[in-house]
Amino acid sequence: MITDSLLTQEDLVFNLQGEGYDLRIRTLTYWRSQGLIGDLHRNGNTYYVEREDQDKAIELCKTRQPELLKIELEGHEFSIERAVVTSFEGELVIRLYTKDQGMLLKVLKEEEKIDAVRRSILDG
């Protein structure tokens, strides 16, 4: 029986990737084999996980991902754990998540957008 307390593995991975975590179904399989997250539920050809496993997966991602960078702003140092680039009202925005659960926002200016695209082409 499918309930609101379940979500597909694909949805869990999609949700966490959207939050900037590097996660794959293969990682979920490994964590499950280690007893770190719950067993799968099956309905036909679709596999589901408990919603609480999403919270567990977030905590596991945090412990395995080192800080991306440190930045200093107005005399305070911030350890950045993950970064997510999104579009908001037509502007590119970078959300920088700190290790202490805070968040910094940066709206990219037009010349920064061009530089970011240029770098992604050169790096890719």
Image (spheres, rainbow, N blue to C red):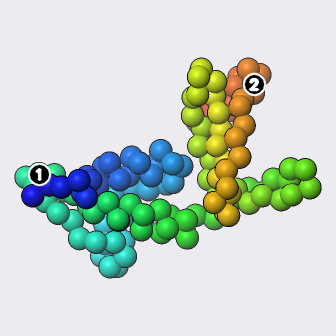
* Marks 2,1: beta carbons within 8 A: no
Expressed as whole percent of the image width and height from the top left, the position of residue 34 reads 34, 79
Which mark is nearer the camera, 2 or 1? 2
Q: Residue at x 72, y 37 (%)?
A: 106
Residue 112 appearing in the image: yes
> In the rendering, which numbered label is found on residue 101?
none
The one of 45 and 117 positioned closer to us in this rendering: 45
| Residue, disc 2 | 109
Mark 1 or mark 2, which is nearer the start of the sequence? 1
Q: Residue at x 72, y 29 (%)?
A: 108
* Image quadrant in which you'd find residue 9: bottom left
The number of numbered badges drawn on the structure is 2
* Rendered-image quadrant of the N terminus: bottom left
Element under disc 1: loop
Q: What residue type is disc 2 on?
A: Lys
Q: Is residue 16 left or right of residue 102?
A: left
User: Which residue corresponds to the image point at 35% horizontal and 65% vertical from the top-left?
Assistant: 53
Helix, strand or loop at label 2? It is: loop
Q: Residue furthest front?
A: 4
In-image side of 25 versus 44 (left or right): right
Q: Nearer the viewer, residue 54 or 124?
A: 54
Occupied quadrant, residue 33: bottom left
Residue highlighted by disc 1: 45
For image coordinates 7% across by 52% down, the residue present is: 44
Quarter that holds the C terminus: top right
Q: Quadrant of residue 37?
A: bottom left
Q: CA distance from mark 2 to mark 1?
A: 46 Å
Q: Is residue 68 visible?
A: no
Measured as percent of width and height from the top left, residue 27 is found at: 38, 63
Image coordinates for residue 112, horizontal then vertical, percent: 75, 27
The amino acid type, in three-letter code, at marker 1 is Asn
Q: Residues within 10 Å of mark 1 (few under 14, many from 20)?
A: few
